[in-house]
Structures are given as C-alpha cells and as structure tokens.
Image: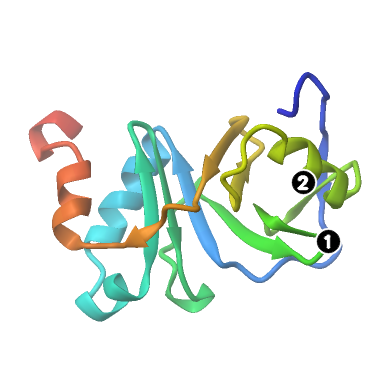
Amino acid sequence: MSNGVIVRWRPRALPLEPVAVAGVGPVALALGQRASRAGDAVLASWTGVAGPDVLVLLGASDSLPWVDGAVYLGRDPLAPSLLLPCALEPDVASSLLERALLVGRGHAPLAVLPGTGVLVSVAAAQPVARASLMAWLPPPEAAS
C-alpha cells in the first residue's frame, strides 16, 4: 500500500468514532443504493467522493448508512490526514503510515481501505446531491 512497504492490520483496542463510510466494487454500489434512499435532510448532511468503482460518504457517525462489507472510517489523532478503519490499526505507527502515504500525493485527507488496497483522496468531497448520486449509480436494469 505504501511504496512497496507491507502494512499489516490488526484489531484496534479502542475503535475510532466513524466520520465516513466507504465501499469498493459491489459494496460501493450497495452503499450508493442505500444512500439514495436516505431522506433529503440526511443526504444534505453528507459530503462525498465517488469514482468508477468507489464511493466514500462523510458525515456524522449516527447518520452514516449501514451496508454489509462497507468500511467505516475515523480519524486517528496521530495521523489526522488519514481516514483509517474504525476497527483496525496498522502494525506501524499511524504517523509513519501517514507520512509514507502522503509522499507525492498531497491530496489529504486520504481514506485508507486496507482490504482492497485502495486509497481515496477526500479533499474534493462535495455535498451529496440526490441527482449526482443517481447519475453515479447504474440504471436499475444494468445493476441486475
């Protein structure tokens, strides 16, 4: 994940407070579909970024949608430029991981998704608009 250095992840003794939820592949689609059913006020409270196969939503922990397989991310005070899995921590110091991941990227904060090895800059997160979310989702016939 970081310039050839292998980082292993272990259960975190004290989970981080969720500030974001992310999905890759089919989980991203399920997250987008679940988010599209949120009420207008909840949807308006989120910001997010999306790519062809990834979706990251940021917001208050109690408003984030629940989807099986999604990664809930929080902020480690020792690595404030990263959004790390709430339930996992790296086997290296978080501050060193942060430094290694930001080299040459400069688009902090970065969402770190260890299960897939994906890094997503959330620096350009925009308010979530239902029309944009629906445009990102495949048409219902393409999703089946």
Q: Amino acid at mark 1?
A: Leu
Q: Residues within 10 Å of mark 2 (few under 14, many from 20)?
A: many
The residue under the point 87% across, 44% down is 96
Furthest toward the top, the residue is 4
Element carrying mark 1: loop
Q: Which mark is residue 78?
A: 1
Residue 65 in view (yes/no): yes
Q: Which mark is residue 48?
A: none
Residue at image coords 52%, 61% = 20
Q: Is residue 45 left or right of residue 83?
A: left
**Which residue is labeled 2 in the image?**
98
Horizontal arrangement in the rendering, residue 11 relative to residue 46 (left or right) = right
Q: Position of residue 86 (x, y in %)?
A: 68, 59
Vertical position of residue 126 compared to residue 139: above or below: below
Give the SS element for disc 2: helix
Q: Quadrant of the N terminus?
A: top right
Residue 144: tell me if it is visible: no
